Image (tube, grey):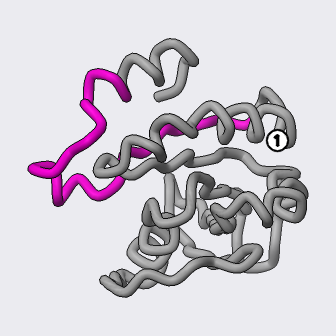
Amino acid sequence: MAESSSADYVFKIVLTGDSGVGKSNLLSRFTRNEFSLESRSTIGVEFSTKEVQVDGKTIKIQIWDTAGQERFMAITKAYYRNALGTLIVFDILKASTFQNLDNWYNEVRANAGIECSIILVGNKVDQRHMRAVLYENAKRYAEERNIP
């Protein structure tokens, strides 16, 4: 990975998934410890960083929050380049976001390459009493594709 003056390593992570699944809130919670109940669509891509210490090394994590709308697919493909990992996010309250996972999985594999690690994230678990996607189905999906 690339080095910078303040970090020993720079890791690029891309958030993908349908619009409205909570990618932007994952980004803001992790990087700024903020959460907003008001939903707004990402246009193109948003980007944020956070530095963490691991074994005495400084790691700068660059997190790229991509737009989930189909009309932005062409421009978001370039954002996968040099990504160490991708979080494919779905909303456990909306079955359609789970049904669209193959689109995102195939997009990551086509544009980020096989070496890019993928993690499947079922979001909005704080509202699990309204769950539309069973945990077992998500687990099976991940296992069939060797996704943690």
Residue 117, picture quadrant: top right
Residue 75, picture quadrant: bottom right
* Magenta region: 116-138
The residue that appears at 20% across and 45% down in the rendered structure is: 131
Residue at label 1?
A: 112
The residue that appears at 77% across and 40% down in the rendered structure is: 107
The residue that appears at 36% across and 81% down in the rendered structure is: 33
Picture layout, residue 35 above or below residue 89: below
Q: Secondary structure at mark 1?
A: helix
Counting every numbered tag in the picture gives 1
Picture layout, residue 4 above or below residue 1: below
* Residue 128: percent from left, percent from top: 16, 50
Residue 109, picture quadrant: top right
* Residue 72: percent from left, percent from top: 79, 65
| Residue count near mark 1 (Cα–Cα under 10 Å), binned few <14, some 14–19, many ≥20 | many
109 or 100: nearer the viewer? 100
